[in-house]
Image (cartoon, helix red, strand yellow):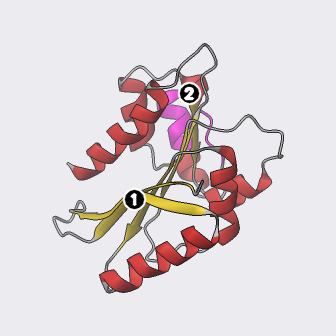
Amino acid sequence: CCKQNHRWSVYGYFANQEGDTKLPICYLDNWEATDFFLKHKVPKKYLVPVNSDPNICSDIFERYGVKAKCMQIEDYLLSLPQSDKGFSVIWLDFMCTKLKSKEAIERALYFTENVEVTLACRGASNDSVFGDAKRVIESSGGIIVDGPSKYKAASGKRNMARMHVRRNP
């Protein structure tokens, strides 16, 4: 349920773009987000799924005809040239308790004003997960404008957290 709400939030940033020039969605995916976005009429050309597992990348292509970037999402963001047009939103849907790369957050904020972050809280205190995320985001020039808020994962336990990050003006 809550992951679905997060997908709706990401979709909203894409759908609410004004003008003729739409920017794509960049997101970490196992195929479920791609399925959601296509069911809600986001054209394939605006989808940039990223996953480091070649089997998952192949699965996304076989199911939907969408070519995934087969690498860590942090590495993908760091590999983009400064001249890249950017994204309507970048969704860093992590299963870890810490943001590993300050540089990746900086790059995400360079390429979009909307960054959605998902972190796991399993086995870690909320203060540790949220405090660490806030430090990394703020040192990257960002600010948390919504969240962090915990939600139930597929396991039924409230051990996931989401937040919306923007550039600090």
Residue tagged 2: 65
Q: Residues within 10 Å of mark 1 (few under 14, many from 20)?
A: some
Label 1 sits on a secondary structure element that is: strand
Label 2 sits on a secondary structure element that is: loop
Q: Which residue lies furthest to the left in this view?
A: 156
Any part of residue 136 in sight: yes
Foreground label between 1 and 2: 1
Residue 120, position as x, y percentages in the image: 37, 71
Residue tagged 1: 163
Is residue 137 placed above or below 62 in the rendered structure?
below
Residue 35, position as x, y percentages in the image: 40, 34
Q: What residue appears at the point 16 percent right and 64 percent down from the top-left corner?
A: 156
Residue 154, position as x, y percentages in the image: 23, 59
Q: How many marks?
A: 2
Q: In this view, does 157 lie to the left or right of 117?
A: left
Q: How crowded is mark 2: few (under 14 residues within 10 Å), some or many (20 or more)?
A: few
Is residue 55 placed above or below 8 in the rendered structure?
below
The numbered mark at residue 48 is none
The disc labelled 2 sits on which kind of residue?
Answer: Gly
Q: What residue appears at the point 48 percent right and 73 percent down from the top-left corner?
A: 134
The part of the chain drawn in magenta is 58-69
Residue 23, position as x, y percentages in the image: 61, 29
Is residue 161 placed above or below 92 in the rendered structure?
below
Any part of residue 101 in sight: no
Is residue 115 placed above or below 84 in the rendered structure?
below
Q: Does the magenta stretch include residue 27?
A: no
Q: Residue furthest front?
A: 169
Label 1 close to label 2 by CB (< 8 Å): no
The disc labelled 1 sits on which kind of residue?
Answer: Met
Sequence-first tag of 1 and 2:
2
**Between residues 29 and 134, which one lies in front from this camera angle?**
134
